[in-house]
Image: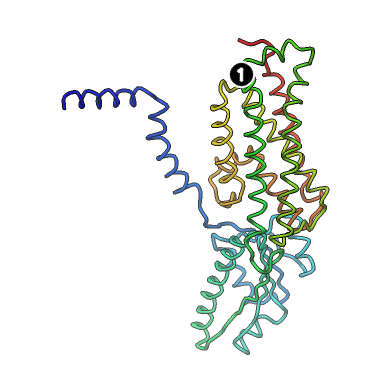
Amino acid sequence: MRQLVIFIRKEFLHVFRDRKTLLMLFGLPIAQIVLFGFALSNEIKDSRIAVVDYSKDAVTQRLIAKIGSSPYFNIQRTLASADQIDAAFKKGDLKMAVTFPAGFGDDVIHTGKATMQVIADASDPNQATTITNYLNQIVADFNTELAAGSGQPMTIVPSMQMMYNPELRGAPNFVPGVMALVLMLVCTMMTSVAIVREKELGTMEILLVSPFRPVYIIISKLAPNLLISIVNLFVILFLSDIFLDLPVKGSFLLLVFGSVLFIMTCLSIGLLLSINAQTQQAAMTGSLMGMMLPTMLLTGFLFPIENMPLALRLLSNLVPSRWYFIIVKQVMLKGLGIGAIWKELLILGGMCVFLFTISLRKFKIRLQ
């Protein structure tokens, strides 16, 4: 028993001397609890909505004020006509539009019943369902207030319409997120071992003394991965169209261009990891852990970015998958053109140039 206690004590000392192990044992659980408990939430707040009020009476004004005072909604704009709703959805990041028909207040007072139209962006079906449920609850509370004030039942019925995904299928939200996740992981992981593999095998000296320029070595490492990733892209789009009934509604070439830009950005990240890593295992771990979690948590795929703390919202701007996720949803699901995604394309282009330039500068032509 004395020997067993000594060995156990030795192992405890090994654990507590290793700072990386201590960080994994104590820091990771604390970080996950804080992150998932406080920072990441499925609750949706400050959803931007537009209002069209043809009636402009006391009832609609009270209901609009009640909706606007809710923490779940932010009345972004008031439209003059319902004809402007489609353009408003395509131009901005509206989540919902509410329309009150002419004579809305008179219908409520004289007939005890009126209908309001609610149009939600269902490209994310879970988010659309959540915010429409919020609105239904607000309208139900307002119906109770009207009935208590008049002494007779009064009912306002929201008529729901889901844009871009009337059936509320999960595929329109699932496919863009999977495209971003798969391309990010495959591109980064394949490229992250490209340079460090040569170092471990001892063949980097041969490449460096060859007549090839260093930039040629890097390009030769990226070219196969680029072509393989493009093939993966076409396979995903083909399967989405055939098996999930999710064709590309917008420009196919524009979607491919944005995807290639995203792929090149991911390859640049993998290249930078490969140049700085000392072993293939370290490069693979860095690409897997450093890219998978941000892609899943900070792109809007699983959790709404708008509801995150400011620090995480700022951090999400550095994740290329966030911008690619927007491009896929705008082009593939909504059928929008370059006018809706030019900002995201510029951001991805800037990231690609910046990361590739840093990789070239950090690529050492002399081995240590």
Q: Quadrant of residue 187?
A: top right
Res. 66 visible in picture: no
Dot 1, crowdedness within 10 Å: few (<14), some or many (≥20)?
few
Residue sitting nearer the eye, 240 or 170:
240
Seen in the picture, residue 211 relative to 6 is either above or below; the reply is above
Residue 155 place in picture, x, y as percent: 57, 82
Numbered-mark total: 1
Residue 87 place in picture, x, y as percent: 78, 61
Colour scheme used in the picture?
rainbow
Residue 354 place in picture, x, y as percent: 72, 28
Residue 151 place in picture, x, y as percent: 50, 88
Res. 302 visible in picture: yes
Tag 1 residue = 201
Q: Quadrant of residue 295?
A: top right
Q: In the rendered view of the protein, which quadrant contains the N terminus?
A: top left
The residue type indicated by label 1 comes to Leu
Element type where label 1 sits in the image: helix
Q: In the rendered view of the protein, which quadrant contains the C terminus?
A: top right
Q: Residue furthest left?
A: 1
Residue sitting nearer the eye, 34 or 16:
16
Kindly identify the residue that appears in the image at 79 percent across and 55 percent down. Answer: 336
Kindly identify the residue that appears in the image at 71 percent across and 69 percent down. Answer: 52
Seen in the picture, residue 89 relative to 284 is either above or below; the reply is below
Query: Is 205 situated left or right of 210 in this image?
Result: left
